[in-house]
Amino acid sequence: MTSLQLSRFRGPRTRGALVAAMCGVAVPLFVACSSDEPGSPPPVTRTLEDGAVVTDDGAVVTQPAEDGGVVVPADDAAAVDGGPKPPGDAQVPPVSGTGRILYRYAGYKLIEARAGAAPFDVGSKLATVSPGSDSRMNMGADGSFVSETTRFGCSTPCLAIFSPTLSSGEKVLPGGAAVRDMRGVTPAVAGGGTIIVHGGRGAHNTDLYVTRKAGGAWSASTLLTAASTFANNFKPQISPDGLKVVFDCGSDPYGSSGTSICEVNLDAGATGFRKVIGPEGGPGGGRNTHSPSYDRDGSIVFEGEWTREQVWRIRGTGAPTRVNGTYGNDNTPCLLPNGKVASLWLDRSGNPSGVHELKLMNGDGSGMVMLVTGVDIIDTGLGCGN
């Protein structure tokens, strides 16, 4: 599922009417119930593009279910297999060849890409850099983080970048001005934290822009998707060499049926725009292709919804191939620098509720291990890096 896709949210399969029962009301599309005492001010919440309702500190209040209702996620204390939340003095997962994965569950979590690793709470560490919350966050191949955030005094969320160790960061000021209206696009980062692709409005409803840091200053953002044939261009991922960006492209900004995958060069003229593949490009046609991520060899791994929701790979202008045909309901892949593929899988035999669990496999689909189970990770995309 894409970061903006509301209609395709695949929540737990059996709890769709839970909030209605708790609140004693008919089920609207999204509901938030407050447990505060009468007369106390309600918590400040906002609804994300995926339909999740979160508080200002990133805690999840409700999530949409596939039956049209809403569900309340497990408590924040739950982590890998329901284990304890990591202590406040836990160490940031190290930058290494093993790789790290960024995911969203009750805020943003970071976990080493190895069996038995414990998740680390990103927000608690960033609070020591600057207080605030993060509404959209991504990680680059080198381990740098980029975020739409209220940190650094941004009363309206703005673009910021953080070091791989989460120990420092700064507001990104292309041409000296903060970036604020990113059109709901999760930004991408590369080049050791010197290249950022972010969303904005330009020739289309949703466009992509690039800014670069040189000599301590960020360049004015330049439009990348002027040549796009689609109204909405979003969910970017930058190639390991920093020369291209691949992204979702479609008629709406939610990644619903008909979404394709596009690519453009990160050169001065934003040359080479092309549609990489669309729903019609797979076996028998399908309804959706989305969530692309580059491998080291330049091939692109993505989710294709043809016979089933599965992880596919495409090289150049060739035909797509399944990474592993065994796994269905396998969503939102991202590539680690070592070539391994992280994704959100719903069909594990010990997962009867069908929640989004974090899976890792080799680039050829072998060697599968589960990294996070028993909690429903919000399907707004994963970040992968060292």
Image (cartoon, helix red, strand yellow):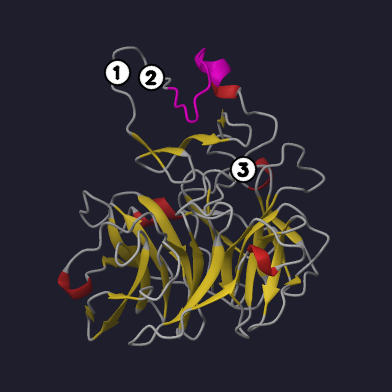
Does any portion of residue 167 appear in the rendered image?
A: no
| 360 vs 344: above or below | below
Q: Position of residue 357 (x, y in %)?
A: 67, 50
Q: Position of residue 264 (x, y in %)?
A: 46, 79
The answer to which of 127 and 58 lies nearer the viewer is 58
| 68 vs 305: above or below | above
Q: CA distance from mark 1 to mark 3?
A: 30 Å
Residue marked by disc 1: 40
Q: Which mark is residue 36?
A: 2
Quarter of the picture holding the C terminus: bottom right
| 184 vs 10: above or below | below
Q: Quadrant of residue 13?
A: top right
Q: CA distance from mark 2 to mark 3?
A: 25 Å
Mark 2 and mark 3 lie on one chain; the one further toward the N terminus is: 2
Q: Secondary structure at mark 1?
A: loop
Badge 2: few (under 14), some or many (20 or more) residues near its Cα, within 10 Å?
few
Check disc 2 and give the amino acid type: Asp
Residue marked by disc 3: 376
Residue interval drawn in magenta? 20-33
Mark 1 and mark 3 lie on one chain; the one further toward the N terminus is: 1
- For image coordinates 77% across by 74% down, the residue present is 364
Foreground disc of the pair 2, 3: 3
Q: Position of residue 354 (x, y in %)?
A: 71, 41
Check whether the beta carbons of the residues at disc 1 and disc 2 lie within 8 A of each other.
yes
